[in-house]
């Protein structure tokens, strides 16, 4: 997932301590034999501290993805969790600080060579560098908060996708388990207290993903908050079709009238092709509701046919 490579963003104190510790180690062991030796030692400390800070800041910026090039799906999800514009501004400030500290270290090395006391100039250089880092303290904290939120996003890939919808207990997870080769992966989902289930299967050389999003597609749209609606909007960017699973036996705990209302909500608000499947044929026998396919995730009856129809919709 594109946000997994973002490392923990260090704090102001962590950056400064690391840089000045490394600078002290660079000075350790150097012989102090007069002004020239002292000058070289102080130059080494300033350059080392400057390089550590510059490299760490540039690495933070580089590990965040470019929001100009990431897929729209992930951009929408990121915008729900964090303020993308503020994140861009913070990254820009870190970039500025990186270049500023690089220039300061070179500036103070030159200043040392004409100064009567290089240790005094070194201390001044360290003070200026620490001041620059202090000016981006809030940016470092915000970027680490954003990083922690973005890393919780599900690993949804840019590949043909089947989204599973329907009320709880209608057989959605059973369908995901039935059509995927491996046991479905359950990951945290930041828009709901429940988990998103993602499974994959192959057809020829093509890989497909099957997603069940409990908490988003298992209750009426009127009951959703703004964040959930934004998450549903993000799903529209996937190359996807929806399978809406009904339970005509009503053993799921919801009457068919309620299930039909949710189906209308998904059709009207989701913006993707919808295949309607009646599940639990082993329990209800005959189904009188108009559907595209009948199946039983318990016995396996109709599963292959449902998957074939979904693949045809994806082709279309």
Image: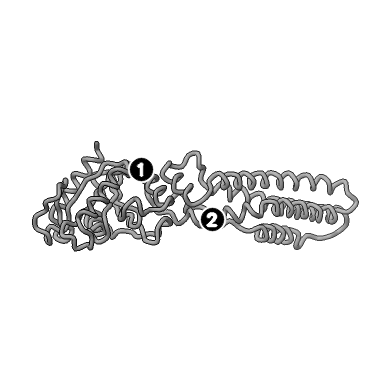
Proximity of marks 2 and 1: CB atoms separated by less than 8 Å: no
- Tell whether 206 sits left or right of 78: left
Question: Which of these two is toward me, 247 or 156?
Answer: 247
Taking the spot 19% from the left edge, 55% from the top edge, the residue there is: 256
Query: Residue 257 placed where, x, y %?
Result: 21, 53
- The spot of residue 53 in percent (x, y) is 67, 52
SS at mark 1? Answer: loop
Judge left or right: residue 108 versus residue 157.
right
Residue underneath mark 2: 7
**Taking the image as drawn, is residue 143 in sight?**
yes
Residue 194, horizontal then vertical, whole percent: 37, 61
Q: Residue 117 carries which label?
A: none
Outermost right residue: 116
Q: Tag 1: Cα neighbours inside 10 Å, few (<14), some, or many (≥20)?
A: some
Could you tell me which residue is drawn at 16 percent across and 56 percent down? Answer: 248
- Which residue corresponds to mark 1? 236
Residue located farthest toward the left when viewing the structure as drawn: 286
Secondary structure of the residue carrying numbered label 2: loop
Render colour scheme: one colour
Q: Total of numbered circles in the picture? A: 2
* Residue 208 seen in the current view: no
Task: Give the residue drawn at x 86%, y 59%.
Answer: 33
**Among the 4 quarters of the image, the one containing residue 251:** bottom left
Earlier-in-chain disc, 2 versus 1: 2
**46 or 292, which lies in front?**
292
Query: Which mark lies nearer to you, 2 or 1?
Result: 1
The alpha-carbon separation of the residues under discs 2 and 1 comes to 29 Å
Q: Residue 253: image x %, image y %?
A: 23, 63
Q: In which quarter of the image is residue 37?
A: bottom right
> For this view, does 156 lie left or right of residue 278?
right
Image quadrant occupied by the C terminus: top left
Residue at the (42%, 55%) spot, across then down? 191
């Amino acid at each position: 997932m594109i946000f997994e490579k973002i490392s923990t963003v260090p704090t102001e104190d962590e950056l400064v301590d690391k840089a000045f510790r490394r600078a002290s180690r660079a000075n350790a062991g150097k012989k102090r034999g007069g002004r020239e030796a002292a000058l070289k030692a102080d130059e080494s400390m300033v350059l080392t501290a400057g390089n550590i800070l510059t490299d760490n800041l540039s690495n933070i910026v580089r590990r965040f993805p470019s929001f100009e090039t990431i897929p729209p799906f992930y951009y929408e999800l990121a915008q729900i969790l964090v303020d993308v514009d503020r994140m861009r501004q913070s990254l820009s400030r870190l970039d500025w600080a990186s270049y500023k500290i690089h220039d300061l270290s070179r500036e103070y090395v030159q200043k040392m060579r004409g100064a009567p006391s290089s240790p005094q100039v070194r201390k001044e250089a360290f003070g200026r560098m620490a001041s620059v880092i202090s000016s981006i303290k809030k940016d470092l904290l915000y970027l680490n908060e954003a990083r922690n939120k973005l890393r919780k996003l599900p690993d949804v890939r840019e590949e043909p996708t089947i989204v599973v919808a329907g009320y709880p207990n209608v057989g959605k997870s059973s369908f995901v388990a039935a059509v995927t080769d491996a046991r479905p992966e359950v990951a945290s989902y930041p828009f709901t207290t429940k988990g998103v289930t993602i499974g994959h299967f192959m057809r020829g050389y093509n890989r497909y993903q099957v997603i069940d999003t409990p908490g988003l597609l298992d209750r009426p749209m009127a009951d959703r908050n703004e964040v959930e609606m934004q998450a549903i909007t993000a799903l529209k960017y996937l190359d996807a079709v929806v399978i809406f699973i009904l339970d005509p036996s009503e053993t799921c705990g919801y009457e068919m009238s309620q299930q039909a209302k949710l189906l209308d909500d998904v059709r009207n608000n989701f913006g993707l092709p919808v295949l309607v499947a009646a599940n639990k044929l082993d329990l209800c026998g005959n189904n009188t509701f108009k559907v595209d396919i009948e199946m039983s995730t318990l016995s396996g009856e109709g599963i292959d046919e449902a998957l074939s129809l979904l693949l045809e919709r994806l082709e279309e």
